[in-house]
Image: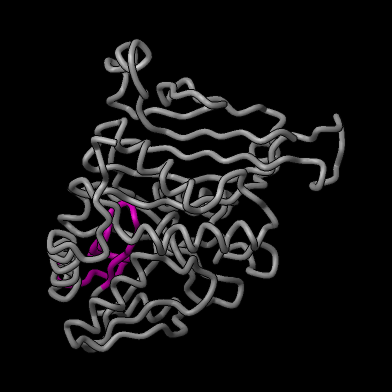
Amino acid sequence: MSNFLVIVCMPISGSVEASMNAKNANGVAFSDGRFVPVGEAKISVLDWGFSRSDVTYDVVHVRDGSFFRMDDHLARFERSMLGVRLTAPHSMAEIASIAERCVALSGLRDAYVAMICTRGSPRVFGSRRPQDCDNKLIVYAIPWIDVIPPDVQARGAHLHIASVPRIPPASINPAVKNYHWGDLTRGLFEAHDAGADTAVLLDRDGYVTEGPGFNVFIVRQGEVLTPDRGALEGITRRSVLELCEMLAIPARIAPLRKQDLLSADEMFCTTTAGGVMPVSRIDDHIMSGGKPGKLSSQLKSFYWEQHRAGWHQTPVNYSA
């Protein structure tokens, strides 16, 4: 398989940039050495990233013109690639520069920036050997995304505990970001059929793992708890644990079961694409009078206050 670079950003210069100005609202891509509108970025149907979900990725956000915890996201992306034996055709420093260039060219001040490495397509047609593939890098910047819409966050999300179990870690390592979303998608259908906003999944032993694109926290007797298994080691999750320490709020990673969710005083979710997102209901268990809890709201506000104060921020050079 041959190397392939895709980066969602904006045009570079001259007539190319001028021709893309009308299309840049949705972001742009760098594909095969050139910048194109994001809708024109392509990947082969023969790429194993598409046909086998043989791919890993990471997502970092830009808020008010600055990356948040960029070094942490790059480090996790590198670990994920090592974990599934993928090698990007660019160094991590180059990927960082590419991501910044994407944002700068797009002009986006609030953005969702993804870095993706796929297996690629076999150089030898029909080969079943991963070694016959040259891995590809895809990086893109598009307008800000909220996993849970702001209006839903304002009233507190309603969650459903899915009946489908999370894919076992022995099969798919949850610490490596992946697109194996069959279980998560089934959980979402269940949640929507039940009138909920989104879902949270348990593992086969009944322990709480995560939701579709977010980590889960509960508050119990003033202590903040998050699951110890079956979940991505989220950067926002880490941030919340650090914020709790800053605020002298007891917090820890611990095993949680279904009943812990159904007896929680408060609950919230965390993700790069949304930050701290309060929950007011899970199945029939209503918390805080059906609105965001006091501690959840405090952490949400403090999270964004720290952003504005420059915490873990890397400003984007828009003039480069």
Outermost residue on the front side: it is 320
Magenta: main secondary structure? strand
Q: Residue at x 18, y 47 (%)?
A: 64
Residue 68 on image: x %, y %: 29, 57
> Quick check: 124 above or below 172?
above
> In the picture provided, is 247 more to the left or to the right than 140?
left
The residue range painted magenta reads: 267-289
> In the picture provided, is 170 more to the left or to the right than 18?
right
**265 and 285: which one is in front?**
265
Residue 291 on image: x %, y %: 15, 64
Residue 10 on image: x %, y %: 35, 27
* Quarter of the image where the N terminus is located: top right
Question: Is there any visible trace of residue 181 in the rendered image?
Answer: no
**23 and 315: which one is in front?**
315
**226 and 79: which one is in front?**
79
Residue 102 on image: x %, y %: 37, 36
Is 279 inside the magenta-drawn segment? yes
Q: Which residue is drawn at 32% across and 18% down?
A: 23
Q: Residue at x 34, y 44 (%)?
A: 112
> Quick check: 225 above or below 95?
below
